[in-house]
Image (cartoon, grey):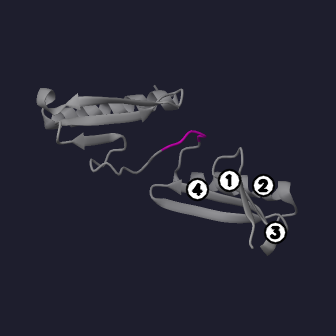
């Protein structure tokens, strides 16, 4: 039986992997951005020990983030929309004729509101929903 232990670390995008049966010990880095995943494993043995492997993983993660243009933050950032509008956090609900807007607050709690298409018209409601989403995201990231 293969026992594989994956432990989250305090470093974003980096996890500890210890798999005794394969004598595999090290740090796994996975940077996700704009639908692509960049990953690399840093073996303790090949990198001169656990701490050296971790330092290598952190360095590689930071260089990879910079290379692909991912913002350097420990906060969660969503860069792809699955809402159908093409905008993260903005969703059209045709049944009740409105755009729903969702975000995460500075405190890490979900926030939401809606913008009426009947009141504003479809184009203006969409624009307003996008502005609300951008404002809330800027507040969360400390940009506002």
Q: Residue at x 85, y 68 (%)?
A: 45
Please name the residue that numbered disc 2 is placed on: 54
Residue 125, given in percent of the width and then of the height, sits at 20, 33
- N-terminal label among 1 and 2: 1
Residue 129, given in percent of the width and then of the height, sits at 28, 33
Classed neighbour count for the residue bearing mark 4: other residues with Cα under 10 Å, few (<14), some (14–19), many (≥20): some
Please name the residue that numbered disc 3 is placed on: 20
| Along the line of sight, the residue nearer the viewer: 122 or 109 | 109
The residues tagged by marks 3 and 2 sit, at their Cα atoms, a distance apart of: 19 Å
Q: Residue at x 24, y 36 (%)?
A: 99
Q: Nearer the viewer, mark 4 or mark 3?
A: 3
Q: Which mark is residue 14?
A: 1
Question: Does residue 38 lie above or below 59 as drawn?
Answer: below
- Determine the image quadrant of residue 41: bottom right
The residues tagged by marks 1 and 3 sit, at their Cα atoms, a distance apart of: 19 Å
Q: Residue furthest front?
A: 1
* Cβ atoms under marks 3 and 2 closer than 8 Å: no
């Amino acid at each position: 039986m293969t026992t594989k232990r994956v432990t989250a670390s305090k470093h974003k995008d980096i996890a500890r992997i210890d798999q005794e049966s394969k004598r595999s010990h090290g740090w796994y880095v996975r940077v996700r951005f704009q639908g692509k995943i960049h990953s690399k494993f840093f073996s303790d043995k090949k990198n001169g020990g656990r701490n050296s492997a971790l330092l290598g993983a952190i360095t590689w993660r930071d260089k990879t983030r910079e290379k692909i243009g991912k913002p350097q933050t420990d906060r969660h950032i969503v860069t792809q929309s699955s809402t159908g509008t093409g905008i993260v956090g903005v969703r059209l609900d045709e049944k009740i004729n409105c755009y729903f807007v969702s975000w995460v607050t500075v405190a890490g709690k979900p926030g939401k509101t809606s913008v009426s298409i009947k009141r504003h018209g479809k184009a203006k409601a969409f624009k307003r929903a996008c502005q609300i989403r951008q404002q809330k995201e800027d507040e969360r990231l400390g940009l506002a």
